[in-house]
Every structure is written in C-alpha cells, then in structure tokens.
Amino acid sequence: MKAIVVCLIGGLGSGKTTVAEFLVGKGFRRFTYSDLVREELQRLAVPSPDRKKLQDTGDKLREEFGEEVLGERIWEKIEDERAEKAVLDGPRSPADISLPRTKAGKFVALALLASPETRFSRLAKRKTGKDPHSKEDFLKDDQRDFGDGEDLTKQNTASCIQISDYKISTERSLEAVLQEVEAILKKEGII
C-alpha cells in the first residue's frame, strides 16, 4: 500500500496546522517534523525544549545521520501506523521532503505563504507558550527557519517553498484558503 501524502510547507504562523486539521477532518493522519525532533530530545532527556533547541537538534540530526534522516523517520511512522492518507506538517529542508515524495503513491507539496507581519499577528493571538513572544525573537527564528542559501543539513524553508508543487497565499479568509486547498487536492486526485 502506497500512502497518499500532502506535505505542508511554510513559516511559523503560515497556517500549516490549520490546513492539517482540515485534512485530518477528511481522513488524513497528521505527522509533524517537529514531533520527530521532540522525540529525539525526549530520548536525550531534554525537558521543555524551546524553538532554538528544536532547530539546533534538527540540524544536528541531519549532520549526524544524513540530510534525509527526518524524511526517513517520518516515512517509518507513516508505514508503522499504516496511514493510507498522511499530511506532513513543517519540513525545514528539501531533504525532509525527497524520500516521502518518492515513496508515496501520490504526493503533493503545498507552500502556505503569508507575510511576517501576518504570521506574527497570528502567533500573538494563539499564545501557545512555545511561540516567540516578541517580534524581534520571531524575526530571528523566522530568518533561521527560512535559511535561504544554507546547506541541506540546516533549516531551509525557503528551498522547501521553491520545490513545492503549489503556492497558496494565506493572507485571506480561512474559507478561501481551504477552498483552494480542496480544489488543488481534487485536481490532483488526492481527495
């Protein structure tokens, strides 16, 4: 059985979680790259990691085990859970995407795009405790996440966006965004 996979790419606050929840409502199983990194930190007994620790650990995993380590681990989870439809939330390197893209029965990568101002405003409203508290901290984390020009062992959301199949602006109503996502996935024969 080859899973049907939708991969959601974007910066912090771009709408990945919201779109993932929409797809969960359509029968998809959600897998997040940051959960893989959190599992590694739990294994190392690191309590309550902050965003920088997650970023550092993701980079270290890629350096130690190869660029595709998170793509391999997320694919193992898909197989272990026998997920027929999976939504992947938050790759930070093109190498995180390459293995799932080749293994899936059908695969589509959606880049969710919004300005830094819009994304910071969303984070300020959701107040999860794990998000950056100041705009300065947000911009610092965001710059590192996007890592344009970095090698593949580093955070590089900008390169992930470049290799996405579709780019969707989330600078509009949620209803309009979800309608576009649904239309794309119908066109691709995914839903």
Image (cartoon, helix red, strand yellow):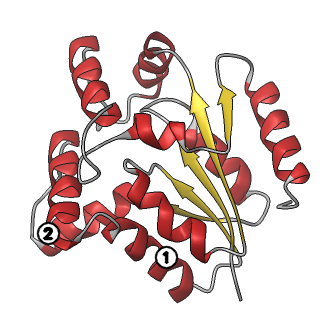
Amino acid at circle 2: Glu
64 or 139: which is nearer to us? Answer: 64
Q: Residue at x 22, y 46 (%)?
A: 55
For this view, does 133 lie left or right of residue 91?
Answer: left
Which circle, 1 or 2, is nearer the viewer? 2
Nearer to me, 125 or 77: 77
Figure quadrant of residue 164: top right
**x then y, percent, for residue 50:** 18, 43
Q: What residue is rendered at 31% in x and 27% in y? A: 142
> Which residue has dot 2 on it?
64
Instruction: State whether residue 133 appears in this view.
Output: no
Going by the numbered disc 1, the residue's amino acid type is Trp
User: Is label 1 in a helix, a strand or a loop?
Assistant: helix
Q: Residue at x 29, y 38 (%)?
A: 130
Q: Which residue is mark 1?
A: 75
Q: Give the quarter of the image for residue 127.
A: top left
Q: Position of residue 26 (x, y in %)?
A: 79, 59
Q: Nearer the viewer, residue 143 or 121?
A: 143
